[in-house]
Amino acid sequence: MKKTLNVKDVKVIKTARVSDGWEAEAEVYEESSFIKSLGLPTRVQDRNIYAVKLADNLEIQSYDRREKAGITE
């Protein structure tokens, strides 16, 4: 997931066993898409939460950004 999203770190903050594998939530800090769209250099990062579906072998099947949790510098 780090490679796909091009981020330094992904922190798993919640996991649950479901009938067809696992569901998890991951916290990811990404460059601010708003500031980036303005073409400005920045160190501001958005904290985003992703819902992740995993197979029984823990391979990622899908992920989806759930919320923007805040801005950090």
Image (tube, helix red, strand yellow):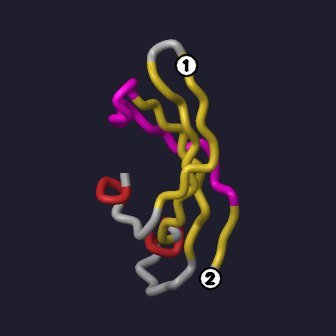
Q: Amino acid at mark 1?
A: Val
Q: Which of disc 2 and disc 1 is earlier in sequence?
A: 1
Give the alpha-carbon distance from disc 1 to disc 2, as whole Å: 36 Å
Q: Residue at x 57, y 79 (%)?
A: 44
Quarter where residue 17 is shown: top right
Quarter where residue 18 is shown: top right
Instruction: Residue under label 1, please give it.
Output: 18
Instruction: Residue under label 2, please give it.
Output: 73
In this rendering, the label closer to the viewer, 1 or 2: 1
Q: Is residue 30 left or right of residue 56?
A: right
Residue most extreme to the left? 3
Q: Within 10 angstroms of label 2, few (less than 14), some, or many (20 or more) residues?
A: few
- Would residue 15 be counted in the magenta stretch? no
Tell me if residue 24 comes above or below residue 27 in the rendering.
above
Tell me if residue 50 comes above or below residue 61 in the rendering.
below
How far across and down, in percent of the image, does residue 36 sit? Answer: 45, 73
Q: Is residue 26 left or right of residue 8?
A: right
Q: Quadrant of the C terminus?
A: bottom right
Q: Within 10 angstroms of label 1, few (less than 14), some, or many (20 or more) residues?
A: few
Q: Amino acid at mark 2?
A: Glu
- Give the magenta-colored segment's residue range: 55-69
Return the residue nearer the eye: 12 or 63.
12
Tell me if residue 66 comes above or below residue 62 in the rendering.
below
- Would residue 67 be counted in the magenta stretch? yes
Q: Is residue 13 left or right of residue 57?
A: right
